[in-house]
Structures are given as structure tokens and as C-alpha cells.
Amino acid sequence: MFGTFFTEEHHVFRKSFREFVEKELAPHADEWEREELFPRDVFQKMGKLGYLGLSVPEELGGAGGDYWYTVAFAEELARSRSAGLNMSLMVQTDMATPIIAAIGTKEQKEEFLIPAIRGEKIAALGISEPNAGSDVASIRTTARKVGGDYIINGAKTFITNGTRADFITLAVRTGGEGYGGVSLLLFPTDTKGFRVARKLKKIGNHASDTAELAFEDCRVPARYLLGEENQGFYYIMMNFQGERLIAAISSVAGAQLSLEEAVRYGNERQSFGRPLMRYQVWRHEFVQLATELEAGRWLAYRASDLFNRKQDAVTEITMAKLYCGELACRVVDRCLQFHGGYGYMDEFLVSRRWRDIRLITIGGGTSEIMREILSKRIGMG
Ligand SMILES: Cc1cc2nc3c(=O)[nH]c(=O)nc-3n(C[C@H](O)[C@H](O)[C@H](O)COP(=O)(O)OP(=O)(O)OC[C@H]3O[C@@H](n4cnc5c(N)ncnc54)[C@H](O)[C@@H]3O)c2cc1C
């Protein structure tokens, strides 16, 4: 499990974070899934322990670690038994805030990033709209410059942490049509004219909230613009890399746990007078899946290594998101099948894992979009 990229320090971190997950998160997962939300103080507790800013420089309140801490974090978080909880946390750490650390002003970091690292503010990433998901360049939410402010009008949908975020890293249209007219703004949710239009019901990831948001003549100061006006599309594509990479890493980690749980189940469950694991057909299938998971993990590690060294990793990250996501869905599906009727029951964790993992080939860019990106990257179109 501990490959060439992990040092003794990573190992120590992994061990203590695993204990935290097993003691503070996993025992509550069933309750949080039922309630379709986890308490806000989870953010605060994790912030205090330094878990929400692992790769952020120390002067900004982060731990100043390299990317391998984030990899260990995502792998251990998979033990929480709740992908919804994990998704909410990773939106905070790896999706809504890295762009602030990368291009934010000192004031923006103080007002938004540092409180998010401390777990005092909850962050969301607002890109998708009712009519623009994969096609980010066609978003319609507008931000019109009036004096020293932007006036925002429009709608966002599928926004994780959307019902209770304190701020949103928001994609808006400040210019003409297409990708050249998109900007990123930091949007405080106590702004007049903002409302949570509805909390969405979904197949899985129940412990995280997902919302549709409405913006009506919301006025925010122009100093909340992230980076340069009309450069937002590039920032979003840059930010997607971390989001897709962590999705790949956590999907392999979750699928690996699912496989281990299935093997334990199969050593107990009897059929026709012997444990299920004694049937060669299953052993061979699980060995095959374990081998593919190992391949997926190393693809994600290869992408992580490039990402960690700030090299161009777009091709490797896109491949990892595509391969690991689709593989994880297949692995968990076969694990459910292996459990027979019990696999279909809520009381068995595999049924939750199966519902939850389905998101992986959709969120953060679909598998089809990954193939589109790759076909351009590797010179096919
Ligand atoms: C639970 C959940 C949480 C989410 N959280 C967030 C969040 O926090 N913030 C946020 O901004 N978004 C979030 N999303 C949105 C997510 O990123 C989008 O759902 C995703 O990007 C796909 O967009 P779409 O749903 O509009 O599908 P569409 O873009 O309408 O795609 C529909 C189908 O068409 C396919 N397709 C589209 N274009 C092409 C093409 N060129 N070639 C081939 N096939 C194509 C797609 O692959 C897909 O299968 C979340 C989604 C879910 C379900």
C-alpha cells in the first residue's frame, strides 16, 4: 500500500488520520446518511486538526505538505463509510479553494481561504447550471460591472455544500459568448438576492447536500473577482485537475475497500456447502479486479507525481479519472452481485457504496468528456 512516493512522515500522517476517520467519522456515517447531512462542526474539528489545508502553504494556515499528504488523506477518508461526507469535505479542500490559494489576492485569502482551512467557513464550487454542465463555456449566469461592484443574475444547479456554504467560488459571464467571457468570483452567500432554490434529492452520496441556487440582482464588490476578468475558463480548467485527480484516487480507494469487504463476506457466506470464496469463478474474478485496481492506483499515482512536481499532468489526470472511475463502478457492482440479495439491502454497506460510486463517471467531468479531452490531447481530433 505504501509505494515509493510515500515517506515515513506521510506514513505517520496516514496512521493518525486513519484513526481519526475510524473514531470520529465512520461511527456516525449511518446517522448522517439517514439525516442527509452531517454536522457543521465536522468542518471545524477537522480544520482545527489541520486536515483541511494539507497542501496549502503554512503562512496561509495550511500544513505546507506536498501532494502525497492529499493522496493519503483521500485514501483514508474512503474508510468513513460515507462518500457523501467525503465529497463535501473534498469540495472544501480540493475543489472550491485551491484556486484561491493559487491566484487569490492577499485579502481574498484572508477573507475566504484561511477561514475555510480552519473549518470556520464552508465553501462550494458553483459552475454547473441547469443548461450548462459539460459545456462550461456556455454558462449564462451574468456578472455585470456597475461602478465598483458586480451585479449577479442567474442560476446554478447540482452544487455540493450548496444549502449551507458560506461562500461560493462562482463561475459567471462577464464578457461575450463562449469561453472568453467567463470569470470566477468569490460570492458570500449572505449577499442580498441569493437564495437556495431547493435541496435536491439524489440516488446516493446522501450525507452531502446538493442544491439548486438562485441569484437575483446580487451585488458583490469587484475586489471579489478571482484573477483577471474573462480568464475564468482557464482557471476552471486548471482547477479541474486537482478535482479529477482526487476523484480518481478516492474511487480506487473506495473500490478496494469494497473488494476487501466482499472477500470477508465470501469467506463466511456458505452456498452449496462451502464458502463463496471457495468458488474459483469468484476468486478469479476478484483477482482480476484487484489487478486492475492496482493498475488504476498506479496510473493515479503517476498523475499525482506529475501534479506534485507541478508538471503538465492533464493527460495522465484525465486518463486516471476515466479509467479509475469506470473501474470503480465495475468493481463495486460485482461486489454487490457477490452479496446476492443482501447486497441489495440498505443494511449492507455494499449497497451504499454501489449507489455512491455511480456519481464518479458524471461529477467533475463525465467519462465522455474525459474521452473528448484525451482524443485532443493524444492527437486524434
Ligand atoms: C451529486 C452531484 C454533485 C455535483 N456537484 C457539483 C458542484 O459542487 N459544483 C458544480 O459546479 N457541479 C457539480 N455537479 C455537476 C456535474 O459536474 C455535472 O453533472 C457534470 O459536469 C455533467 O454535466 P450535466 O449534468 O449538465 O450533463 P450534460 O452536460 O447535459 O451531459 C449529458 C450527457 O451527455 C454527454 N455529453 C455531453 N457533451 C458531450 C460530448 N461533447 N460528447 C459526448 N457526450 C457528451 C455527457 O457525458 C452525459 O452523459 C454535481 C453533479 C452531481 C450529480
Image (cartoon, rainbow, N blue to C red):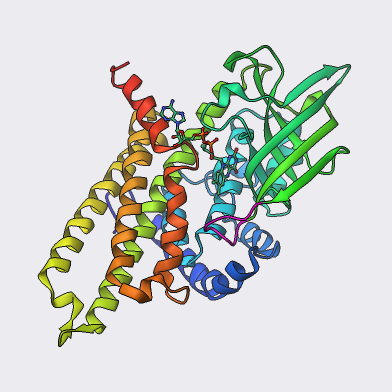
* Residue 94 drawn in magenta: no
Q: Residue at x 35, y 30 (%)?
A: 371
> Outermost residue, left direction?
280
Count of marks, rendered view: 0
Q: Is residue 35 left or right of residue 257?
A: right
Whether residue 216 can be seen here: yes
Nearest the camera: 270 or 183? 270
- Residues drawn in magenta: 200-208
Q: Is residue 270 left or right of residue 110?
A: left
**Residue 38 at x, y percent in the picture:** 65, 64
Q: Residue at x 76, y 46 (%)?
A: 196
> Outermost residue, bottom direction?
273
Quarter placement of the N terminus: bottom left
Against 227, residue 332 (above or below) is below
Quarter placement of the C terminus: top left
Whether residue 7 can be seen here: no
Q: Residue at x 37, y 30 (%)?
A: 313
**Residue 283 at x, y percent in the picture:** 15, 68
Against 40, residue 53 (above or below) is above
**Residue 253 at x, y percent in the picture:** 37, 57
Q: Residue at x 30, y 57 (%)?
A: 331
* Residue 206 drawn in magenta: yes
Image quadrant where residue 187 sits: top right
What's the magenta bit mostly, secondary-structure-wise? loop
Q: Is residue 34 left or right of residue 198?
A: left
Image quadrant where residue 368 sits: top left
**Residue 197 at x, y percent in the picture:** 76, 45
